[in-house]
Image (cartoon, helix red, strand yellow):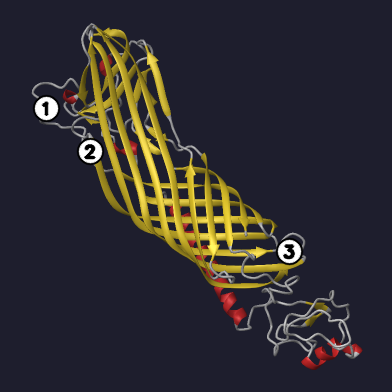
Amino acid sequence: MRPSTKIFVLILGCWLFVGSSAHSALWAQQAAGNAPAGGPPQRRSTAAMPARRQTGAQRAAYQEGVAPAENLPSAAPPAELPAPAGVPAAQGAAQPYYVPEQEAFVDDGNYAGYDPGYANYGSPMNCGVFSKLWVRGEWLMWDMKGMYAPPLVISSRVENIDPSELHLNDNGNLGVTNPIVILFGGETLNGEARSGAKFSAGLWLDDCQTVGFEGDYFGLTDGDDSFYLNSNGSPILARPFYNVLSGLESSELVAFPDPVNGVAHTGLIDIDTSTRFQGAGARAIINLGCNSGCGASWWNGCSMPTMGRADLVVGYRYLRLDDSLRIIERSNLNPGGDFDITDRFDADNTFNGLDFGLLLKHQRGCMSVELLSKIALGNTRSEVEIDGSTVITPTGGAAQQFVGGILAQRTNIGQYSQDEFAVVPELGLTLGYELNPCWKLTAGYTWLYWSRVARAGDQIDRDVNPDLIPEEADPPADTHLRPQFRFVHDDFWAHGLRLGVEANW
């Protein structure tokens, strides 16, 4: 991970920790009746109500229609509503607005009750919307770390170059000196931004929204970089490698304008690469605390219901990252015949781990903001497959097939797997706007990091013994057995924007 990325993660993690700690402290103060000034108003017990709170006798007198004038509210009470079951109606008079004994108060002439089953209007909201099931669909536009591939195709700016000079620099930096140019490779591939989709659904197990479950799946479109060039000799085409016999950089000619040692070279190179990234998860949501009250609008300062909550999320995390790199060479040597050479490198990574973190949410009216900070600890299983083949069709003869190409030989062809411990932290920010109690628009940002993966391009060994290139000498070589395979690991990250819609029932 780059130092700047480490610093960003550290600062953001500290910010989320301090913010959540402050939020928890505020809830604790409010629960003890010591909320700091400016905090959202809370329910007050009967004993803590101000003097204008009605006593039981005053309320009874008011309901009978004989309350003293000075005890009546300055504004007319709300529309008449029937009393709940078990509460006797007033005798000889219509039953006015009923508010339960333990919650009723008159504040500046306005009635407000906290009974969610009866008089919600004008009261602070509960710790969430009044729904138990939610489904969210999101469109993604994410950038992610691509895979590195060494230089795979080179050429020359001039055609009268000596074929022995057609190679990379011998100083080990895989660079080139004029007139040599790299046509493909020597850079990061499949790292461009791409679109995708994410789907999530959840269910609260109780009306108080203290325990729930949620699941999600996301996938991005495949990233692919490719190269194709067919040459009759111009431009020059060659495949570079490091010759372990000479100890120098070298190359295999594919197309060259003039005959080399009396043999003309023409041909093509076709390279395809792809990267696929997807993931899923399932988790429990456990409420750690919540508060509700009334606050000023972010837009115009008007009073509106507010809600804040902190939830612990604990569950399972799955990620899958697949890379593929395939090189096809078709060349014709005259005299000689046709050569069809294939090298293929595949790397598949699967993460399974325990996922846990903290979700903070604040809602003010129809606007909401969510902050997610979590980390998954688990195992990354990396599987690499290397394959190569060569088909030689002599002029006027039958085709012959051999094991091995150029970079994939009998010395490194095979299937390999390895398990490594890995961590996957994730940060998320989501803004929401409720169109109505059932529908919400969302916009957010996600940053995800994966500490241990194997990429296809990193598994290429450029050290080659040219005596192993088919058709191999007889007897077969038993020294300088290169290329060889060894696991090379890297990290991976992905981040980007989310736009979605959420439905609640």
Q: Residue flagged by tag 1: what amino acid is it?
A: Ala
Q: In what element is the residue under mark 3? A: loop
Q: Is residue 358 left or right of residue 186?
A: right
Of the numbered discs 2 and 1, the one sitting upstream in the chain is 1
For the residue marked with disc 2, what is the amino acid? Phe
Residue pictured at 60% horizontal, 83% vertical = 32
Asked if 399 appears above or below 6 in the picture, the reply is above
Give percent across and percent down for residue 89: 81, 85
Residue drawn 28% across the image and 34% down it:
460
Residue at image point 51% right, 39% down? 194
Residue 60 shows up from this direction? yes
Residue bearing mark 2: 485
On the image, the x and y values in percent for residue 189 come to 41, 34
Q: Residues within 10 Å of mark 2 (few under 14, many from 20)?
A: some
Q: Is residue 381 above or below residue 211?
A: above
Residue 445: x percent and y percent? 55, 51
Separation of marks 2 and 1 at Cα, in angstroms: 18 Å
In the rendered view, tell whether residue 137 sits above or below residue 82.
above
C-alpha gap between disc 3 and disc 1? 79 Å
Q: Give the SS element for disc 1.
A: loop
Where does the C terminus fall, quadrant-wise?
Answer: bottom right
Q: Residue furthest bottom?
A: 57
For mark 1, what is the residue?
477
What residue would you read off at disc 3? Answer: 297
As drawn, the label of residue 294 is none
Q: Is residue 155 left or right of residue 108?
A: left
Location of residue 45 by image quarter: bottom right
Is residue 406 something one can see in this rendering? no
Residue under the image location 35 percent in, 48 percent down: 350
Residue, far left: 475
Q: Nearer the viewer, residue 167 or 70?
A: 70
